Image (cartoon, rainbow, N blue to C red):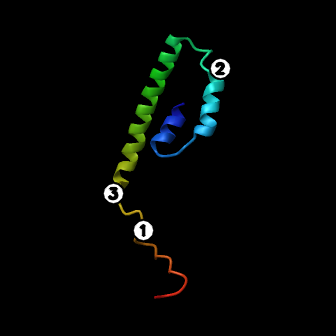
Amino acid sequence: MTSHLLSKHFGLDTSEKAIKYMAAWTDNLKALDDKQLANSLGRVHKTVSKMLKQVESHTKPYQGKSRGHAQNFPRTPNKGISR
């Protein structure tokens, strides 16, 4: 669940595999009582929060920078008909 939520935060859709895995892990939520489920979701929330803070602290210096080619690399020439 943690990896699914982190992936979703960053725009990656892992639903196809993650939902099936989570359903199997919890036996479609039959394997956990309400207290166990609440405790598990609390741990997931805490872990996701810590991981997001770490990832974002390392990527923050790159936010707002140009997404184009780096200055040291020449641009790929346009192919095709010149106008």
Of the residues shown, which amino acid type is indicated by label 2? Asp
Horizontal relation, residue 55 to residue 4: left or right: left
Mark 1 or mark 2, earlier in chain: 2
What numbered label is drawn on residue 70?
Answer: 1
Mark 1 or mark 3, earlier in chain: 3
Q: Nearer the viewer, mark 1 or mark 2?
A: 2
Q: Residue at x 50, y 11 (%)?
A: 35
Q: Residue at x 64, y 31 (%)?
A: 20
Residue 58: x and y, percent? 39, 46
| CA distance separating discs 1 and 3 | 14 Å
- Choose top left, top right, bottom left or bottom right for residue 50: top left
Crowd rating for badge 2 (residues with CA inside 10 Å; few <14, some 14–19, many 20+): few
Badge 1 vs badge 3, beta-carbon distance below 8 Å: no
Q: Which residue is mark 2?
A: 27
- Choose top left, top right, bottom left or bottom right for residue 32: top right
What numbered label is drawn on residue 45?
Answer: none
Q: Residue at x 62, y 15 (%)?
A: 30
Residue 77: x and y, percent? 50, 80
Of the residues shown, which amino acid type is indicated by label 1? Ala
Mark 2 secondary-structure assignment: loop
Of the residues shown, which amino acid type is indicated by label 3? Gly
| CA distance separating discs 2 and 3 | 44 Å
Q: Which residue is mark 3?
A: 64
